[in-house]
Structures are given as C-alpha cells and as structure tokens.
Image (cartoon, rainbow, N blue to C red):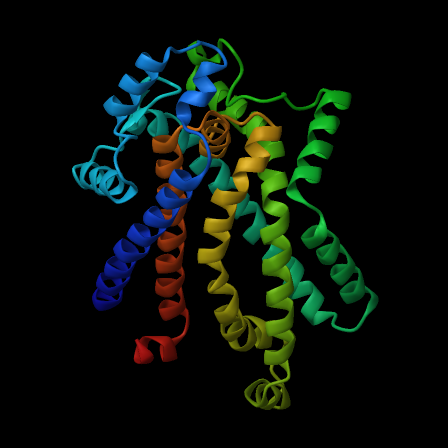
Amino acid sequence: MRILLLRRGVQAIGVLIALSFVTFLVLALTPGDPLAHREGRLPLSPEVREAWRRQWGWDQPVLVRYGRWLAQVARGHLGYSIEYQMPVSELIGARLGATLLLTLAANVIAWGVGLPLGIVAALRAHTWVDRLHAVLMTAALTTPRFFLALIALLFAMVTGWFPLGGLHSPGIETAPVVPRILNVIWHLVLPALVLSVHPLAVISTHLRGALVDVLQADFVCAARAKGLPSRVLLWRHALRPALAPVIVLLGYSIGSLLSGSAVVETVLAWPGLGQLAVEAALARDPNVLMAAVLASGAALMFGNVIADVLLMLNDPRARIEG
C-alpha cells in the first residue's frame, strides 16, 4: 500500500506539471490579455498599459513566464488575482470549501441511490423493472447538466421551497449551530441533486451490468446449487466482485463532479470554485484559472488514489498484483 501511494504521488506531480503547462500555453496563445477586460471599465493609456504588462511579466516569452509561475507555486504562492485584487490562495480557499461540500453531498447521493438501483435492476434483469431502470438511466445520462440546473432553478422559483443561490441565508451567521447547519443543507439540496444525476446513472448502470455477469458466474451457480438463500448469495458471494469495476469509477466521479460543478454553480448561484473559474475565464484572470485547473486535476488524482486503495481492500487479487 505504501509503495502504491508513493508511486501515485510521483505520478500526480508529473501529471499536474504537464496539465499546468498545457493550460498555461493555451491561455498564453489565446488572443488578447487580462487588461482588455479592465479597459472596458477603466480606459488605460498606452503608457499605463505597457507598465502593467512589464509589472505582470506579460512582455516575457511564454516559457519564461511559465517558469516563474511554476517557481512561485513551488514556494506555495499561487500568484495574485488581477480581477479581485487579492492573493489567489485566499480567493481559492474561500471558494474551495463550498465546492468540496457540494461535491461530497453529490457523491453521497450518487452512491447512496445508484448502488441500490443497480442491485434492484440486476436482480430483476430482463423484466419491466430492468427496462424502466434502463430508460431512466439513459435519460439521466443524456440530459445536460445545464438543462437540469435550469429546471431546478425554475422549480425553486415557482414553488418557493428552496432558496435561489448562496451558501446560506443572510443574517444566519449569528444563529445557533444547528439552525446554521440546517440552513446550509437547505441551500445545498438542489445543487447537490442536479450534480449527482450523471454519476448516479453511471454508477447504477455499471453495477447492474457487472452484477448480472457475476450472478451467472460458475462460483455463484455452484453456491446456488448448494441451496444458499438469495440474500446470502447476493451479499456474501456476488456483490463484492461486482463492485470492483464500480470502485474504479470513484476517481472519475470525484474529478467529473468537481469540473462539472462549474455549470451547476453558475446557474444555481452556488459560491464555489466552479463559479469562480467561470468568472475568471470571462475576466481573463490567468492566475485564478491556473489555480482552478490545478485544483480539478488534484481532485481527480486524489480520487484515483482512493479508488486504488478501495479496490485493493475489496479484491485480494488487486493486492497481489500491486
């Protein structure tokens, strides 16, 4: 296990460096610069514009600028936000907690609902239950998150059951702990539900297919021939090997939720990292965009490590191969 974690850590550093370089290159080759966004609100003379370019190092070659950025990141400094006029680390820290909370809630919903649905569909394979499951999961997979977020927003506006945006209600900061927690959960329900739809469908569909194959395997047929009850057959013999391909999806689900949260956070006004990345892209704020990309890449690598560890704990063959 220690060797696996060490190997994954080295790989993560290499992947994040490569990801940061490609992102930096794309941002550098995009026409215009961050001053173009500010000039729409505050006209700048050519002298001031050139002074700002020298101050921020935009007159240097791309590789030189990337080297300077990488060196400051290695020292723990993510740079300075031009749009928000504050250190990027403080800006990211203020938004990252909201996105992690949203991602955690969406994962809990996706796995807590997707696994039982997949088990029920597999046990009722080739029946109307299985066909209904296939239709619902296909609809969930093919419906864009943007459209789901708009439906949730319209639902909140029409019914008034849920708040429109924000992490909590104004003035709730002075309330006791329990009302504050309940208020955050109230604001979290719709964004978490919308964000969980896609991974829920992926998890449920994969588990259904894997469990149907395992239930037809020789060792399960032998256990069934011995007269084992269906409940024991499922929980002790079939479910554990069927979970192996689903566990691999854990890393993908964490990374995809963090990157997919940008659409949900923007439409439903959830003050997280995804919304910040969209605002930074519109404002051409390179340091904030680089930090957001690094956070998404780190989340994906972290999810893959968790998936590898869980796979080894679930499957002895994976420990032997590892």
Residue 301 vertical position relative to residue 55 in the rendered view, above or below: below
48 and 139: which one is in front?
A: 48
Q: Farthest residue toward the right?
A: 128
The residue at 37%/32% (across/down) is 286
Q: Is residue 144 above or below residue 288?
A: below
Tell which residue pokes out farthest to the left in this image. 75
- Return the residue nearer the eye: 4 or 12: 12
Q: Quadrant of residue 145?
A: top right
Seen in the image, is 147 located left or right of residue 297?
right
Q: Residue at x 35, y 52 (%)?
A: 302
Q: Quadrant of the C terminus?
A: bottom left
Q: Residue at x 25, y 35 (%)?
A: 60
Q: Residue 318: give x, y in percent of width and height.
A: 37, 76
The image shows residue 8, relative to residue 256, as above or below, that is: below
Q: Identify the residue at horizontal 25%, vertical 38% (top origin).
A: 65
Q: Quadrant of the N terminus?
A: bottom left
